[in-house]
Amino acid sequence: MVVTEPSPAAAAGRARAPWRGRAFGLELDAPYALPGLSESNGRAGPCRASLELLPPASIESAWPAREGRTLVERTFPDGRLMMRIEEHPELGYRIWAPRYGRHLVSADGTRISSALPRLAPWRWQRLFFAQVLPLASALQGLELFHASAVSFCDRVIAFAGGSGAGKTSLAAHLVAREATLATDDVLALEPANGGVLAHPGAARASVDEHELQAMAPEGREALGEEVGRSDKIHLALPVLDRPQPLALLYFPRRSPTPGEVRIARLEPPGTRELLAASFLPYLQSPARLLTHLDVCARIAGSVRTYRVLVPPDVPSRGVAAAVEAHAVDALEKG
């Protein structure tokens, strides 16, 4: 069943302003309740940001294009623009993807100005949750990993890797097996108490349809309701309600060799894998570099890291079962 979400205008008419949501360690003040963001419970994290909604023309007039520097430009095979990210030394960042919205993020990450398209929210959320909010979080000092994560026993286990590594499918099957989703694809981390805190992301996940079909009905129900379809099924589901310590970090890798799932501890911790897992690589300020190195060092000292070799003949649900058994054993042993 597809859930029809309210348009920004309709939601604005029903909610009191401002509304405060939370994701990626941010408390976000918004003019109305944003679909996909959990309402703040005061435990999101140390960072604050405000969201202002503007017409597209106002976004464009506020950005001095000639003074901006293009950091990222992705195009479709036919040459059409997919996404562009620009930087201005004083004004911050401009993120634009045709049909997905235009956004300005201040240099310190505390102010976001957005022009949202008149489309179903799940469409513009793909850019807002994958780029805009994570950028604001990183600019305020949190570190971002390209990872999905779930919570077991008040601790977070994460799966890091690039696109196609299977981290979202792995997290989805673990949620179907009664774990709690922490985040899909972008993980915000904060140095704390000698270790690392993992912050919940948006209350959304994008999962391949065949993975959902492979789940038992009760497991599929745990993944929430369908809100839209593209190349994947976009789901609205509950996420972790507070940051928790990151305890285990897995790096799934495809293996050409048939057989069983193999999980091997990385000793010493996978330095190369940790450095490669950084999200938003275009953000290369000295402060960001220091934060990333600090978080990597803390992970190396307090988080057990593992490589997961996934054979071609083992489905994602089988990988999830192997990882769950391994994680439960590792957490019990402390």
Image (tube, rainbow, N blue to C red):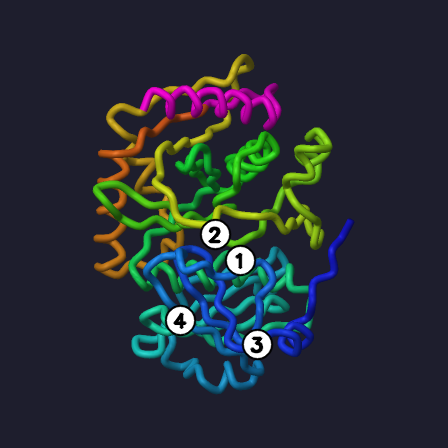
Task: Examine the structure image and report whether residue 318 is included in the region drawn in magenta.
Answer: yes
The residue shown at (60%, 58%) is: 76
Circle on res. 231: none
**Residue that extends furthest to the right in the rendered view of this protein:** 1
The residue shown at (46%, 40%) is: 149
Give the SS element for disc 4. strand
Instruction: State if disc 1 and disc 2 touch (CB < 8 Å).
Output: no
Image coordinates for residue 163, horizontal then vertical, percent: 51, 42
Residue type at mark 1: give it: Ser
Give the SS element for disc 2. loop
Going from N to C along the chain, the mark reached first, 2 or 4, is 4
Give the Cα separation between the discs numbered 2 and 4: 21 Å
User: Which of pointers 1 and 4 indicates the residue nearer the eye?
Assistant: 1
Going from N to C along the chain, the mark reached first, 2 or 1, is 1
Task: Examine the structure image and report whether residue 221 is included in the region drawn in magenta.
Answer: no
Give the SS element for disc 1. strand
**Residue that extends furthest to the top in the rendered view of this protein:** 259
Q: Is residue 249 left or right of residue 314?
A: left
Please state, as top left, top right, bottom left or bottom right, where the C terminus lies in the image: top left
Image coordinates for residue 206, horizontal then vertical, percent: 61, 47
Going from N to C along the chain, the mark reached first, 1 or 4, is 1
Residue type at mark 3: give it: Arg
Q: Which residues are magenta?
A: 309-334
Q: Nearer the viewer, residue 10 or 269?
A: 10
Give the Cα separation between the discs numbered 2 and 1: 9 Å
Give the Cα separation between the discs numbered 3 and 4: 29 Å
Relative vertical location of residue 135 with respect to residue 221 in this rendering, above or below: below
Give the Cα separation between the discs numbered 3 and 1: 16 Å
Going from N to C along the chain, the mark reached first, 3 or 1, is 3
